[in-house]
Image: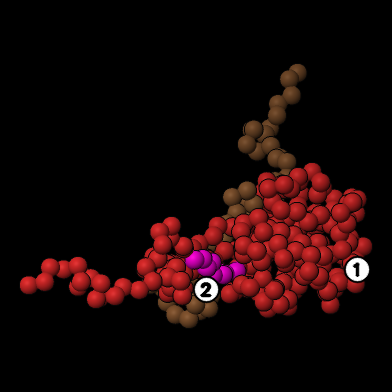
Chain colours: A red, B brown
Amino acid sequence: MAETDSTTFIPNFCSWGPRPLTMDGVFVELLQQHFESANNIEHEELQTRIFSKTASLNNILIEESTVWTPKETQRRPAVIVHQNGWKCIKRGTFDNVSGNTEEGFTRHTKYWRGSHTLFPIAKEGAEAKILAAEVYRYFNYFGPKFRRWFGLMMFELMGVGAPARIEEWDEHWTLPITIAYGWADEWILKPDDPVIATIRLSDIFSIWPQE
Amino acid sequence: MPRLDPQTPDERPRPPKEVKNPFVETISIKNWAPTEAEEARMDALMDERLGNGRD
């Protein structure tokens, strides 16, 4: 079974939590680490296609969709990581569901839900199916671990699409794999003005004219 | 003597029509996005994690 080293990219991820580019990085890094050793790869057919940063035409290509050059995937398999739209979910008035801090600053929380689709691509339908199986099994089994690592509320494999030829690139096959994730974005607002610590009623009454 | 072609143009043999594999689907990855049903499933899962329905 696969071994994945979390120490290389988690500190960077954790500082601000999920952002579009960091989530791209999560999927690309996890896949690259999985495919960089034949020991991790379950399917024998893919064990000769291990990932290498100095890729040759035999190695699997793992890239984010905006930087992918289809020409580089003419004969070798690839997994292209593509971000879908994200939704924010409002809870509570002014997103203030967590009350105030001891200093009087307001705590806020907004929930988010997003997804990425991974496109395993190969020239033959059978190879695309094998590649898809390698990818979805990896995320299915390690999903609970990844959810904890990245402090997410949800990390779920949603499904695997039917095998299909790519319309823009008729010679190649893919089976889209969608993974959904959700998290809480929390922040504290500190007002510029000094916060009134206490209000004494006696001070207010003392400035009123006495009858 | 001119040779008469007994066949009208419509009766002439035509080249065999190419039959595409009907099982082969195509998808466009250019504008790919999850379907509304998939989005609804993701929303339902997130609601489940949040404990109840939305505001």
Q: Secondary structure at mark 1?
A: loop
User: x%, y% of residue A188?
Assistant: 49, 66
- For mark 2, what is the residue? B46
The crowding category of the residue bearing disc 1, from other C-alpha atoms within 10 Å (few below 14, some 14 to 19, many at least 20), is some
- For mark 1, what is the residue? A38
Q: Which quarter of the rendering shows the C terminus of chain A?
A: bottom left
Determine whether, in the image, residue A98 is placed left or right of residue A130. Answer: left
> From where the camera sits, is residue B36 visible?
no
The crowding category of the residue bearing disc 2, from other C-alpha atoms within 10 Å (few below 14, some 14 to 19, many at least 20), is many
Magenta stretch? A181-188
User: x%, y% of residue B12?
Assistant: 69, 37
Prevailing secondary structure of the magenta residues: strand
Please name the amino acid that badge 2 sits on: Met
**Label drawn at residue A149:** none
Please tell me which residue is depicted at 82% across the width and 65% down the height of the picture.
Answer: A33
Please tell me which residue is depicted at 73% across the width and 76% down the height of the picture.
Answer: A142
In this rendering, the answer to whether A30 lies above or below A61 is below
Viewer-nearest residue: B54 or A206: A206
> From where the camera sits, is residue A95 visible?
yes
Please name the amino acid that badge 1 sits on: Ala
User: x%, y% of residue A155?
Assistant: 63, 72
Q: Chain of mark 2?
A: B
In this rendering, the answer to whether A92 lies above or below A124 is below
Q: Which quarter of the rendering shows the N terminus of chain A?
A: bottom right
Q: Reply yes or no: does residue A184 show up in magenta.
A: yes
